[in-house]
Image (cartoon, grey):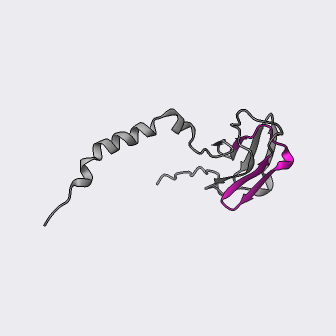
Amino acid sequence: MVIDFSAFYDLPRQIDRFFDEFWKPNVISQRRASYPPVNITEDQTNIYVDAEIPGMDIDDLEIILTEGSLVIKGNRKADNGNYYRQERPVGVFQRIINLNVPIDADKVKAKMKNGLLEIVLPKTDEAKPKKISIEAE
């Protein structure tokens, strides 16, 4: 029986090369990020979604609440002109946020101010925490 260990001879150098490439600043900055960036918080009664979408018109956005998820769709139009550098994304985007809590769809509110889209998703009564009293015996 012959065991071939030749693949492991170069392993330390391959591991070093992997970490060298991983920590390079240009590689980190080129990672694909989800767009738009969101903050998701909750309290006893609501889930709050804040999405940063500067420069967007409300007519170019669509918010869809499905069972179990919130979808933010839009189309960021490019400005006319010759760019020296373009870092802000343009084009069609879609962000899906999974919700693990039942939402009262009739009471959902959304507003846009200064490029910040704020969505308030009220939890249903079944999803709200309930205090259970303990009986003494």
For image coordinates 45% across by 35% down, the residue present is 23
Answer left or right for 39 relative to 4: right
Q: Residue 69 lies in magenta, yes or no?
A: yes
Instruction: Say whether residue 125 is visible.
Output: no
Q: Residue at x 56, y 37 (%)?
A: 29
Relative horizontal placement of residue 81, taking residue 29 as reference (left or right): right
- The quarter of the image holding the N terminus is bottom left
Single out the residue that lies furthest toward the right.
Answer: 59
**Which residue is found at the position 25% from the left and 51% from the top?**
8
Is residue 101 visible to us here?
A: yes
Q: How many marks?
A: 0
Place of residue 116 in the rendered image (x, y in percent of width and height, measured from the top left): 76, 37
Question: Of residues 106 and 65, which is closer to you in this image?
Answer: 65
Residue 100 horizontal/vertical position (percent)? 61, 56
Q: Which residues are magenta?
A: 49-76
Query: 107 and 1: which one is in front?
Result: 1
**Where's residue 5, x and y in %?**
21, 55
What main secondary structure does the magenta stretch of the protein show? strand
Furthest residue in direction left, as rendered: 1
Q: Residue at x 80, y 33 (%)?
A: 114
Q: Is residue 130 magenta?
A: no
Position in image of residue 101 (x %, y %): 63, 55
